[in-house]
Image (cartoon, helix red, strand yellow):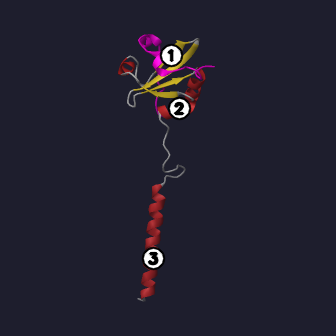
């Protein structure tokens, strides 16, 4: 057999192998790196403000992974606690509604966090988290 014919077969075999590996890497109709956004990503996109917990007891007094509503300065504020990252997320009613619509879009993946009353918020030092301007209607 001629060396050029053998060489052409090897080149085609390598090309075909690379092509098949490339096709196997990406599922049809889905980008290879697409992932559903996390709860905290959706909170931020919905307009919640994230702040690092300034006192550890604030995390102990709030239910992790749930919303708590509080009335401050005549407005309803939603507080979400992420104990893993030690972050508090503060948002308005409008931000909470935006979050709910985003969560409804991915509802098949996980249940929505529940909202608790402000009963655990009595010892919460609001002054440590600055002004509440921008949260509310």
Residue 136 placement, left or right of 66: right
Prevalent SS, magenta region:
loop
Residue at left offset 52%, top offset 30%: 43
Element at label 3: helix
Residue that label 3 marks = 11
* Residue bounds of the magenta highlight: 108-137
Query: Mark 2 touching mark 1, by CB under 8 A?
Result: no
Q: Which residue is mark 2?
A: 44
Question: Pointer 1: what residue?
Answer: 69
**Residue 133: within the magenta?**
yes
Horizontally, is 101 left or right of 66 in the view?
right
Residue 97, picture quadrant: top right
| Disc with the residue nearer the chain's start (3 vs 1) | 3
The secondary structure type at the circle numbered 1 is strand
Quadrant location of residue 72? top right
**Residue 15 in the image: x percent, y percent?**
47, 71
């Amino acid at each position: 057999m001629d060396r050029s014919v053998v060489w052409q077969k090897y080149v085609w075999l390598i090309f075909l192998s690379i092509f098949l590996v490339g096709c196997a890497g990406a599922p049809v109709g889905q980008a290879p790196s697409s992932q559903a956004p996390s709860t905290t990503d959706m909170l931020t996109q919905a307009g919640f403000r994230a702040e690092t917990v300034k006192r550890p007891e604030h995390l102990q007094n709030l239910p992790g992974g749930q919303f708590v509503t509080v009335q401050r300065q005549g407005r309803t504020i939603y507080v979400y606690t992420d104990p893993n990252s030690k972050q508090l997320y503060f948002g308005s009613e409008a931000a909470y509604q935006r979050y709910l619509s985003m969560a409804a879009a991915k509802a098949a993946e996980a249940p929505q966090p529940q909202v608790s009353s402000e009963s655990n918020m009595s010892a919460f030092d609001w002054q440590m988290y600055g002004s509440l301007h921008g949260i509310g209607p």
